[in-house]
Amino acid sequence: MGKEEGIEAYGRGDFREALDQFLLDNNDPADDVELSYYLGLCYTRTDDFETAQLYLNRVVEADFNLIRIYQSRMILSYIFALTERFDSAKYQLEQIIREGFESPQVFASLGYNCWALGETEGAVEYYRKAIEIDSENITSLNSLGYILADEKLDLREAMENCRKAVESNPENSNYLDSLGWTYYRMGNYKLAHQYLSRAGSLDRENSAVKQHLAIVEKHLG
């Protein structure tokens, strides 16, 4: 009973059973970085983010396994973004880059957090870096397109990016919303309404879509 059984349970997706097994382990997580890592993963999976943060910070501070450090920082950035601590999320991601890891996921996450912090220039820069590495990174294309449209920085590029995102997944309400908002920024309220209505029908609880649709409908009279 303990860590090995916990790893096995975690591998099959039984996160609560895995957590129970890890807590039965005789080792102190303060002295067993691998155990801290798995406890952090389990608490994240069971939505106990405060406890997860404690264990993942131990990994970041004490581990020599660069992959575990990278993954722990990524999860910490996810927790911080989810709880709207965007500065802390950004810090974790910047540390990943300083430690030598660059990926579309890291740059896209930085773009998201910069945008949440109102740092438009940084958001655009990081989304572009994500796309430079992976030109088919649809999430980054859509996000960059939305920012370029919302800030009226480059409506032509915004349209290209958002169209590509919608073509890749025509049923994604966020992609439809971005394309609709781009049409709005271009002054084409009829097409804006068409795409935003589709987005709204697919996700009736999306507050951003509701807000955008209300704005467009005012222009349509």
Image: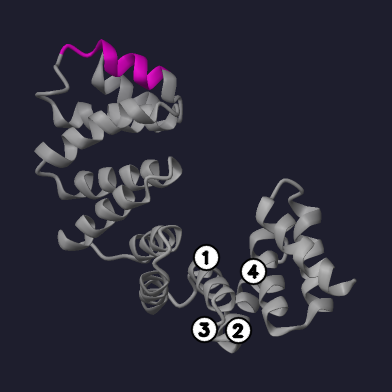
Residue 9 lies left or right of residue 140; in this view the side is left
Residue 129: x %, y % from top left: 35, 75
What residue lies at 84% left-to-right and 77% top-to-bottom?
190
Q: Secondary structure at mark 3?
A: loop
Pointer 3 or 1: first along the chain: 1
Magenta stretch bounds: 17-26
Camera-side mark, 4 or 2: 4
Pointer 4 or 2: first along the chain: 2
Camera-side mark, 2 or 3: 3
Residue 16 lies left or right of residue 219; in this view the side is left
Q: Is residue 115 visible?
A: yes
Dot 2, how many residues are within 10 Å of its Cα: few (below 14), some (14-19), or many (20+)? some
Q: Are marks 2 and 3 in contact (CB under 8 Å)?
A: no
What residue lies at 28% left-to-right and 14% top-to-bottom?
23
Dot 3, how many residues are within 10 Å of its Cα: few (below 14), some (14-19), or many (20+)? few
**Which residue is labeled 1 in the image?**
139
Q: Check if residue 22 falls in the magenta segment.
A: yes
**Which residue is labeled 4 in the image?**
178
Camera-side mark, 3 or 1: 3
**Mark linked to residue 153:** 3
Residue 151: x %, y % from top left: 54, 76
**Which residue is labeled 2 in the image?**
160
What residue lies at 26% left-to-right and 51% top-to-bottom?
92
Pointer 4 or 1: first along the chain: 1
For the N terminus, give its image quadrant. top left
Q: Secondary structure at mark 4?
A: helix
Closest to the observer, 204 or 164: 204
Quarter of the image where one finds residue 68? top left
Residue 27: x %, y % from top left: 14, 16
Label 2, label 1: how many angstroms apart (C-alpha)? 14 Å
